[in-house]
Amino acid sequence: MSNNKTNYTYRASPEEFASIDAKAKRYGFATRAKFLSHAAAEYGQHTPDDVFMQLSHISYSLHQLVRADSGRLHLLKPRQIKTISRHVREAMTALIQGSD
């Protein structure tokens, strides 16, 4: 991995920063800079097929959660729960970006 760093300046009104911070928090980013860097890197990268792939992950994850809710939590491993969480975050991000 490269150790190169890129610095950039972003000027916006306090209202715009509040909106960006709210989105960053909603999408699970720790900082505004991480959110903006991710958004810049991913801009225009998603296709409708990506959305359907994410929806399939949501479907699988929901099925796993139904298993847990029906008293079969012992069938889920901690790794699977982390995977479910990641899939849901990725899918929601793809769906939200697709609707913007």
Image (tube, rainbow, N blue to C red):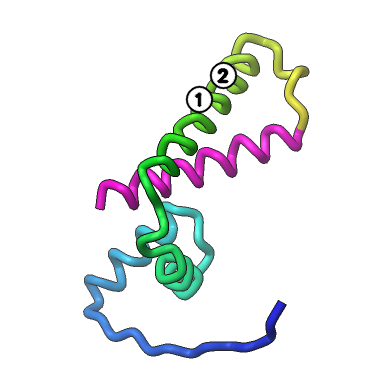
Whether residue 80 sits left or right of residue 46 in the image: it is: right
Checking the image for residue 59, the label placed there is 1
Q: Inspect the magenta stretch and tell me whether residue 91 lies in it.
A: yes
Of the residues shown, which amino acid type is indicated by label 1?
A: Ser
Checking the image for residue 95, the label placed there is none
Q: Is residue 12 above or below residue 78?
A: below
Q: Name the residue carrying label 2.
A: 63
Q: Is residue 19 above or below residue 99?
A: below
Q: Is residue 64 above or below residue 83?
A: above
For mark 2, give the secondary structure: helix
Residue 85 lies in quadrant? top right
Whether residue 82 sits left or right of residue 52 in the image: it is: right
- Label count reads 2
Q: Residue at x 47, y 72 (%)?
A: 37
Of the residues shown, which amino acid type is indicated by label 2?
A: His
The Cα–Cα distance between marks 2 and 1, rounded to whole angstroms, is 6 Å
- The residues colored magenta run 78-100
Image location of residue 1, percent across then percent down: 72, 77
What crowding class fits label 1: few (fewer than 14 Cα within 10 Å), some (14-19), or many (20 or more)?
A: some
Image location of residue 49, percent across then percent down: 42, 40
